[in-house]
Amino acid sequence: MKSWIITTLAFGILAGVLAVQNENQAAPESKKVLRHVVLFKFKEDATKEQIREVEEAFAELPSKIDAIHDYEWGTNNSPEGHDKGFTHCFLVTFRDEAGRSEYLPHPAHQAFVKVLRPILDDVTVVDYWASVD
């Protein structure tokens, strides 16, 4: 009887260990990237050509700054009416904080800021960590 109890306990412990091991293997830690969200509100007297120049200059940054992992942008089309005059959203993705630290003072980024500054009324920037598959 004792050997049956010991055998049953041993199998129970082994099953528990294997279950925990499988759970750890099935749920790997998710990869994260750093998202840099930038919203622009342009001055009322900014021309379409000036705004297009800003759009194009921002779109060139990924080819000039290796730290940029991904990039996308668009203009506001929300029907909610809470945009507060912000018309453009740019999303820059970095692999880590070091990438962002390289990007901010980078000469190409600083040259872009010089193109932007004369027609910029306001800017909002939010950075956050995002889990990716």
Image: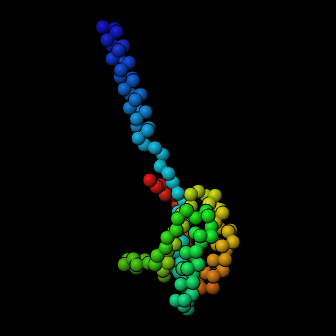
- The answer to which image quadrant residue 20 occupies is top left
- The answer to which image quadrant residue 64 occupies is bottom right
Please identify the quadrant where the N terminus is shown.
Answer: top left
Residue 6 seen from this side: yes
Q: Residue 79: horizontal and vertical position, in percent?
A: 36, 78
Q: Residue 19: horizontal and vertical position, in percent?
A: 38, 32
Q: Residue at x 55, y 62 (%)?
A: 69
In this rendering, is residue 98 above or below 42? above
In depth, the one of 6 and 84 nearer the eye is: 6
Q: Residue at x 35, y 22 (%)?
A: 12
Which residue is at the far front?
A: 63
Which residue is at the far top?
A: 1
In the image: residue 24, left or right of residue 61? left
In depth, the one of 100 and 128 nearer the eye is: 100
Q: Residue at x 54, y 89 (%)?
A: 49
In the image: residue 56, left or right of residue 7? right
Q: Residue 23: horizontal and vertical position, in percent?
A: 40, 37
Q: Residue 123: horizontal and vertical position, in percent?
A: 56, 76
- The answer to which image quadrant residue 14 occupies is top left
Q: Residue at x 57, y 84 (%)?
A: 53
